Amino acid sequence: MATLLAPEDFSPGEDAMALNKAFKGWGTDEKAIIWILGHRNADQRKQIRLAYQQIYLEDLIKKLKSELSGDFKRAVCHWILDPVEREAVLAYEAIIKNYRTDYRVILETAFTKSAEELLTVKRSYQFLYKSSLEEDVASHTAGDMRKFLVAVVSVYRYEGEEIKEGVAHSEANILGDEIQGGRGGGGGGALKGAEEIIRILSTRSRPQLLATFNYYKQIHGISITKSLDGNPADEFSEALRAAIQCIKNPKRYLQKVVRNSINRVGTGEDALSRVIVTHAEKDLKEMKDVYLQKNGRSLDDAVASETAGNYKAFLLTLLGNQDYF
């Protein structure tokens, strides 16, 4: 369930003029921008962008980039994008703009969407950047991480509920053998030679994988995520663990992403705003419930205590909370 509070009736022309008024004068009226854009859904925001272009012959996103700054600017400019376009932009930034690819963003792109949704993101990526998501991931990663990330963004995953119990049992054994063998008998070294792990995680349906993970625990007496734990420096194993957690329970995984971004020294603004902006129109209400259950305080309170100013007001608005505005 969404947390966004958007009116059924609105005027894109009036909103465009109100935004233009907010840009005038000695200083930008950020509260007006938050109030308007923070209460408009994707279709309404698209209409506002078109109206602004027609009235002022100027792109609204470019105008916002010139008027705003910092984390607030980044969050607002991501928010105003069409959701599919936004996912493509976030993937591009995770691959190209950082000194190293942020595999977590790529995994969220691959594992929190349906096969058709992932396909539309990839089409948008090609349109925007004149290259494929797969080739850019491959160009900016190496080794097993490259094999894994390219595989998960390349597949069109089966989404039916059918489970092949024999396959699940067999592949639970295969996963156990490869995890133990790849670490030289179960030590804390880096995992290597994970072709079968990559094949299974990147091609099987979610119900099939959940059955495999259950068999894994029955056979080996330990969850697969704990089997992959042990060496924080092993980024590939950390990526596999993140993927498995996302497959098991996407909302629980994403609340963990938010929690980690809030609890780190210096809030991880990219991850925090990414999750809130991309889920405010979808399932952020359920994620807030999981966050409260797991952390003993509301996500609204956590955001209010760890962010400030217009950035805080904007995130809280998307969370459906008007108390801090």
Image (spheres, grey):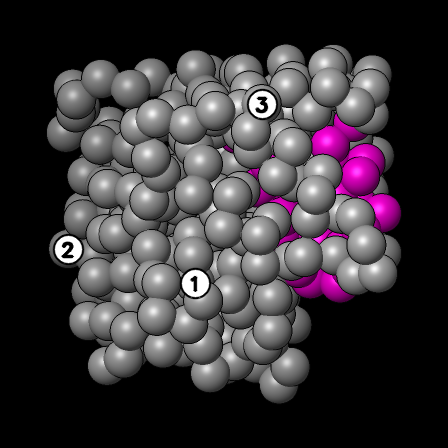
- In the image, residue 299 sits, relative to residue 203, either above or below, namely below
N-terminal label among 2 and 1: 2
Q: Residues within 10 Å of mark 3 (few under 14, many from 20)?
A: some
Q: Nearer the viewer, mark 1 or mark 3?
A: 3
Identify which residue is drawn at 36% across, 77% down.
301
Q: Vertical placement of 32 versus 83: above or below?
A: below
In the image: residue 242, left or right of residue 219: right
* Image quadrant in which the C terminus is located: bottom left
Q: Residue at x 56, y 33 (%)?
A: 15
Q: Which quadrant of the figure has residue 170? A: top left
Whichever of labels 1 and 3 marks the residue nearer the N terminus, that label is 3
Sort mark 2 into few (<14), some (14-19) or many (20+) by Cα contacts within 10 Å.
few
Question: Up-down: is 306 above or below 320?
Answer: below
Residue 316, labelled with which disc?
1
Q: Earlier in the sequence, mark 3 or mark 2?
A: 3
Q: Nearer the viewer, mark 2 or mark 1?
A: 1
Task: Name the one closer to the observer, 47 or 232.
Answer: 47
Looking at the image, which is closer to me, 51 or 182?
51
Q: Amino acid at mark 2?
A: Gln
Q: Quadrant of residue 150?
A: top right
**Cα distance between the residues tagged 2 and 1:** 43 Å
Under tag 3, what secondary structure?
helix
Q: Amino acid at mark 1?
A: Leu
Image position, residue 93 (x, y; %):
75, 43
Report the magenta stretch's main SS. Answer: helix
Determine which residue is flagged by label 2.
218
User: Which range of residues does the magenta coloring cover?
Assistant: 59-86
Q: Is residue 116 left or right of residue 159?
A: right
Give the residue at mark 3.
Answer: 13
